[in-house]
Amino acid sequence: MRIIAGDWRGRKLSAPKGDATRPTGDRTRETLFSMLASRLGTFEGLKVADLFAGSGALGLEALSRGAAHCLFVEQDKAAIDAIRANIQTLGARERSAVQHGSVLSLGPAKEPYDLILLDPPYDTGAGAVALDRMLRLGWIGPASWIAVETGAKETVEVKGLSLDAERKVGKAKLTLLTRVD
């Protein structure tokens, strides 16, 4: 696993051992960030949340491309260790925060995030549950973009969010959402 583009292009990332996490593959990540870049134009200065973060590959990719800050939220201890190691290796401590715990236990946001990246366990519906909660707690603003990676047959539907795009990549489906006002 490596960073696809930006300041850290080509740098390797470590992933937690075992099968408790399923890191987003390079091809899927490349497709996702191409979809996002065509809509956002640039990642410069964005405030990003990487939820169900696993190795932190999605948030680190955003930081490599110029995001100002990323919050990584993960409940698995081995994954938290991998995220912290990757942040250290890339020198991203000042632009990162790591929260050990469930995405479903997050409290109200101080302000909305520009980009929210979710890679929940496949076929659980956890992404939609988390997004519904985050919408109510102020994490998602009128200009926020949300990217969810699910199993290829899953659909992400959340009242208050609008589907912008879906794309299947192997066993995964990438879904981009925006807030409906």
Image (spheres, rainbow, N blue to C red):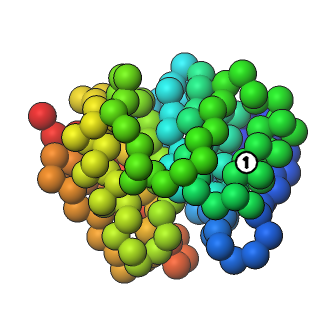
Name the residue: 38% across, 65% down. 126
Q: Quadrant of residue 55?
A: bottom right
Q: Is residue 115 left or right of residue 125?
A: right
Q: Is residue 122 above or below residue 142?
A: below
Q: Name the spot of residue 157 as percent of width and height, x first.
A: 23, 61
Pointer 1 residue: 83
Label 1: which secondary element: helix
Q: Name the spot of residue 31 as percent of width and height, x first.
A: 55, 56
Q: Is residue 7 above or below residue 52?
A: above
Tally the numbered discs.
1
Q: Nearer the viewer, residue 174 or 141?
A: 141
Name the residue: 82% across, 56% down. 14
- Mark yes or no: residue 3 visible: no
Name the residue: 63% across, 39% down. 98
Q: Is residue 35 left or right of residue 33?
A: left
Q: Quadrant of residue 70?
A: top right
Q: Quadrant of residue 136?
A: top left
Q: Name the spot of residue 48 as percent of width and height, x first.
A: 51, 34
Q: Is residue 149 left or right of residue 99?
A: left
Q: Residues within 10 Å of mark 1 (few under 14, many from 20)?
A: many
Q: Is residue 116 left or right of residue 74?
A: left
Identify the image quadrant of the N terminus. bottom right
